[in-house]
Image: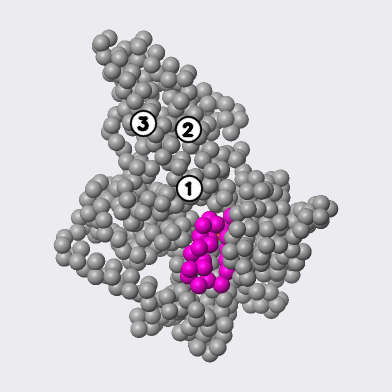
Amino acid sequence: MLYKGIAASDGIAIGKAFVIEDEEFSAVKKPIAKEDVHSEIEKFKNAVIDTKLELEKAKGKVAKHFGKKHVKLFEAYIFIAEDPTFEKDVISKINKELINAEYALYNVIEKYSQVFDKIEDEYFRERGKDILDVGKKIMKHITGAHKKMLSEVTEHSIVFANNLTPTDTIVMKEENVLAFATNMGGVTSHTAIMARAMEIPAVVGMKDITTHAIHGQTVIIDGNEGVVIIDPDEDTITNYKRRQQLYIGEIKELSKYMDLPAVTTDGKKIVVASNIEIPEETKSVISHGSEGIGLFRTEYLFLNRREFPSEEEQFESYRMVVEKVFPNSVVIRTIDLGGDKLLPYFNLKEERNPFMGLRAIRFCLRHPEVFKIQLRAILRASVFGNVKIMYPMISGIDELRAANYLLNEVKKELSSKTIQYDENVEVGVMIEIPSAALTVDILVKEADFLSIGTNDLIQYTVAVDRINEYVTNLYDPLHLSILRLLKTIIDTGQKAGKWVSMCGEMAGDPLYTEILLGLGLEHFSVVSSSVLRTKKEVRRVNLAAAKKMADEILNDPSKRDIILRKIKQRRKH
Ligand code: PEP
Ligand code: MG
């Protein structure tokens, strides 16, 4: 059976399905005989031991990838599982009420959760969810029903899930998962972005694929075309093995662009840099012949943990990246938390429209104590290489000034303590909100560079949630409104003598390279695995012809489809 979804990360994989089921917490009450009490209690105790082992294993994996500081969540889970009062409560319930272990556990956890639900303080209220999570894990071990969880994924399998978080993708990389498919998600969701960064083929937005895939069945994922095939016949497998070889061949062929500059046929030099999410990706930046880092999404340092990373820890991460990439530059974006990247440990209210809520720079300006620590860490790292600072989600000049005010305060504080930093560090602004794009002439006067975040710019301009699979068809990077905004941003930035980059996913899609060059873009920042392909595209474009093409599509949007067809045709040869 063939199913179509959204092509989220390139590559073809053939393997066995590992279907992660949605966990829900429930149990049926069953009376037990007095002589069965002992065995029910043993069942519960063994499940607690198995849960602790599972958590220890997960903790080890996270520590390996994110460092020891990120394991606090797992430590807290283990602490709950080991809590003697909790154990006593469940055992006494089995004993006194003569009920099965599942129900006793369910009952105790439910009671605890209710108590936590009533707590005013959000931080403590959140801890109720941790208790529920631990309860689910123990329940799974008692029932042996074995609902599959990501932590148990086996090597070389293909994961199917309703939804996955960006950090789940890192766990999958660690476990050598071949590919994944999800019911939810869009091409610019951070899970999809992470899949491309980790080079795991993926298809997202499949709506109900988890109801079709059966655990252990042979499946094919074609991340290039956004196709999932369940239980393929021999001919289909042979066909996809051939496609897989062709794709691997194409990737190998790209290595010849490693040491070649990205220059158009008429001699215009273009910069192709990388986007990274975690410091470990620096290796990939270097191995793909990238010209530095155009976007370091630092918020990943803040995820999967129990408290904010300290100034020292942040400083070490930034310094490591900056030193490795030197003499190329690193654009360190200040944290963009919120949206689909939530902080479980900070007292923030749940928002109805998180992408339009207290996100990114808004969060930082509301919490200068958090922001200033990051700015201090970045400034301190700036003497170890070539650092630039960038603010996300700026909606207007007041926010830029407020952020710069805090930056200057931090600079003064460092100077007063004779702590060194690069006094000429460039400060740029992401243009990813229509209000910023429409006032870019004002913003550019107080910024050293601009970077266009098309992932958000498109979602806000066309009003299409970037992670909602039901409206993906409307998420159009070539919408006339977007092309007009891009032209305005690029022209205005360049006229002011500032450099303009694009770090949204549009920059890394070879379909758009020519049009973007035609619109005047000179700096591309893309996932590392797309650097060589982008260079290849740039090297076959004639800038004069590209400019004509961009003008044509701007003046007559009805030509859009013809032009796209032409580009696709040309790319085939
Ligand atoms: C963007 O919005 O295009 C961008 C690069 O930022 P993020 O994807 O992290 O929101
Ligand atoms: Mg963005």
Give the residue type that dot 3 points to.
Asp
Q: Is residue 480 above or below residue 353?
A: below
Residue 226: percent from left, percent from top:
33, 63
Give the crowd class for mark 1: few <14, some 14-19, many >=20 residues within 10 Å. Answer: few
The amino acid type of the residue labelled 2 equals: Tyr
The image quadrant where one finds ligand 1 is bottom right
**Marks 3,1: beta carbons within 8 A:** no
Label 1 to label 2: alpha-carbon separation? 18 Å
Q: Which mark is residue 50?
A: 3
> Who is closer to the viewer here, 315 or 466?
315
Q: For the N terminus, give its image quadrant.
A: bottom left
Q: Which residue is mark 1?
A: 64
Q: Quadrant of residue 270?
A: bottom right
x, y (%) of residue 217? 22, 50
At label 2, counting other C-alpha atoms closer than 10 Å, the crowd grade (few under 14, some 14-19, many 20 or more) is: many
Viewer-nearest of labels 2 and 3? Answer: 3
Please report the bounds of the magenta region as a residue range: 276-298
